Amino acid sequence: MDYIAEEQGFDEKIVTRGGTFYIDGASVLYLVGSTMDWREDDFAAGFVFENPNAKGACGCGESFIV
């Protein structure tokens, strides 16, 4: 995830109460069915992604294998 300065032509735009998110056009098919949630506990806070298409993931939760 990263901040962007402006929307690109093939970006998928998702508007929520928490903000506007963009997915680049090349990644959309890999993320179909995914959910994103904000979670906080006593040790950490951040976005958590659940991707039903993922066959494996790294320990940090930011990368996955399809």
Image (cartoon, rainbow, N blue to C red):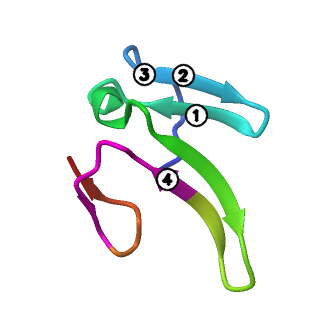
Give the residue at mark 4.
Answer: 49
Q: Residue 48 appears at what percent x and percent y?
A: 55, 58
The reply to whether discs 1 and 3 touch (Cβ–Cβ < 8 Å) is no
The reply to whether discs 2 and 3 touch (Cβ–Cβ < 8 Å) is yes
Q: CA distance from mark 1 to mark 3?
A: 10 Å
Residue found 56% across the figure and 46% down from its top: 36
Query: Image quadrant of residue 20?
Result: top right
Q: Which mark is residue 13?
A: 2
Q: CA distance from mark 1 to mark 2?
A: 6 Å
Frontmost residue, 43 versus 26: 43
Which of marks 2 and 1 precedes in the sequence?
2
Which of marks 3 and 4 precedes in the sequence?
3
Element class at badge 3: loop
- Judge depth for marks 1 and 4 and give the one in front: 4
- Judge depth for marks 4 and 3 and give the one in front: 4
Q: Amino acid at mark 1?
A: Phe
Q: Residue 55 appears at what percent x and percent y?
A: 22, 54
Residue found 76% across the figure and 40% down from its top: 18
Q: Amino acid at mark 2?
A: Lys
Q: CA distance from mark 4 to mark 2?
A: 17 Å
Which of marks 4 and 1 precedes in the sequence?
1
Q: Residue 29 appears at what percent x and percent y?
A: 29, 27
Q: Which mark is residue 21?
A: 1
Q: Amino acid at mark 3?
A: Asp
**What is the magenta range?**
48-58
Query: Image quadrant of residue 26?
Result: top left
Q: Which mark is residue 11?
A: 3
Q: CA distance from mark 4 to mark 3?
A: 19 Å
- Judge depth for marks 4 and 2 and give the one in front: 4
Q: Residues within 10 Å of mark 4 (few under 14, many from 20)?
A: some
